[in-house]
Amino acid sequence: MNYDYILVRYGEITLKAKNRKMFLNALERSIERAMEGYDVTIDVQRDRAYVQINDEPHEKIMEALENINGILSFSPVVKIKTDEESMLNTAVALGREFRHGETFKIEVKRVDKTYHLNTYDIQRLLGGYILENIEGISVDVKHPDHQLNVEVRPEAIYMYYEVRQGVGGLPTGTGGKSLLMLSGGIDSPVAGLEVMKKGVEIEAIHFHSPPYTSPEATNKVKKLVEIMSRRTGTDIKLHIVPFTKLQTTIYEWIPDNFSMTTTRRIMLTIAEELAHTINAQAVINGENLGQVASQTLQSMHAINAVTSFPVLRPLLTLDKNEIVEKARAYGTYETSILPYEDCCTIFKPKAPKTRPSLEKVEKFESKVDFRPLIAEALENVECFSAGEAEEKEAFAGLL
Ligand code: ATP
Ligand code: MG
């Protein structure tokens, strides 16, 4: 089928009354970015948008729209003249895409009230013609497999049946900025993408401890940032913090069963510092209630005590299988399960406290001055961006 437009429906934006314009502008920018390289015309209106696809392949265009935050659903649409013959031919062409045994109904929206056929006439005309010309499909007005939509407007008639789900949420760049604590695991990339869905821009922070952690482990995190960037049409910056000295100091001074708590407390302290520097308003992590020792409520209480900064935990109440499902859908799962260890796996205590008392952990930490090591780590942060890496690669290819 040759489609002319993709009709785009908005999600949460439709709830915005006051600053809808700002949300629509952001959505337009996202669509423009996703459509780079395609010859399309984008028309963002108050309640819906049209992407005129000219001769571009509609499947590719739809794949790109599938990942844009703020889009609830979209449909490939045929635009035809306002005569009966065009309508009949298009109805049959669309009906041929239904499978044997499937049912349909026709839904007419008559925006042009002066059109010479009324809703019922159009339904009967098209329904009858489809049944006459295509075998093996039937009408079901209550629970059809497909709804063939006919929108009669003064300038043209629009017809479509397919509706594809988008990401929903709000357009990127409308919800402030957060710093994602990104390990190489399954959870944190999903946590970041969940928050991004609400329009929040992110940068990421990763702690590595060479030589205890391998370059492969750090590369895996870079790869995750690349996947997340591509998926959201953004260029996520990754800040890589050298954590070896802190990690070995913790290992040396803090009793084994409290070392996890202290590690997390120091990571959060550094994350907050960096968040201030990059003007982020919150930190995100992939913590999940009850999943492991460091993620009990008592643990979170002891860890969180180092900051009054907002810490977002979008996966808090999900079950592991739900997180895995999301990771697969987001395309991060396969990379996350690569076997390279992050720093905490290597320094993992044998029996971490599941209910660390804040008083005790503070007492142990008071014996060491971590501040100069924290300052040193912050001074030596390396920055990586997927966009820049891509540019470098392209440049290297030219040499
Ligand atoms: P994940 O799958 O995201 O690694 P997890 O279930 O393994 O999570 P933990 O290892 O306890 O959980 O880590 C909890 C959270 O702390 C992670 O989701 C992540 O946000 C953060 N975190 C852990 N290790 C690191 C690291 N090396 N660098 C940055 N953030 C980290
Ligand atoms: Mg982990």
Image (spheres, rainbow, N blue to C red):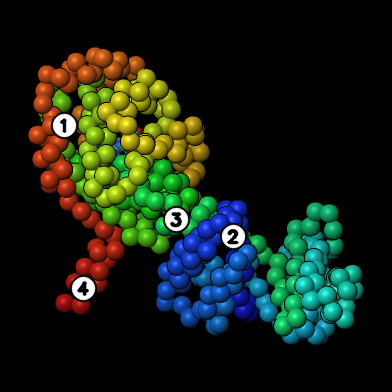
Disc 4/disc 1 C-alpha distance (Å): 37 Å
Q: Nearer the viewer, mark 1 or mark 3?
A: 3
Could you say whether the residue bearing mark 3 is in a helix, strand or loop? loop
**Mark closest to the chain's N terminus, 2 or 4:** 2
> Residue at the location (52% across, 58% down)?
19
Could you say whether the residue bearing mark 1 is in a helix, strand or loop? helix
**Can residue 259 be seen here?**
yes
**Amino acid, disc 3:** Thr
Q: Say which residue label 2 marks.
A: 10
Disc 1/disc 3 C-alpha distance (Å): 37 Å
Q: Are marks 2 and 4 in contact (CB under 8 Å)?
A: no
Q: Are marks 2 and 1 in contact (CB under 8 Å)?
A: no
> Residue at the location (53% across, 75% down)?
42
Q: Say which residue label 4 marks.
A: 395
**Mark closest to the chain's N terminus, 3 or 4:** 3
Q: Nearer the viewer, mark 3 or mark 4?
A: 3
Q: Nearer the viewer, residue 357 or 22?
A: 22
Quadrant of residue 341 within the rendered picture: top left
**Can residue 351 be seen here?**
no
Disc 2/disc 4 C-alpha distance (Å): 38 Å
Disc 2/disc 1 C-alpha distance (Å): 47 Å
Quadrant of residue 14 within the rendered picture: bottom right
> 10 Å neighbourhood of mark 1: few (<14), some, or many (≥20)?
many
Q: Are marks 4 and 1 in contact (CB under 8 Å)?
A: no
Q: Say which residue label 3 marks.
A: 174
Quadrant of residue 294 within the rendered picture: top left
Q: Say which residue label 1 marks.
A: 247
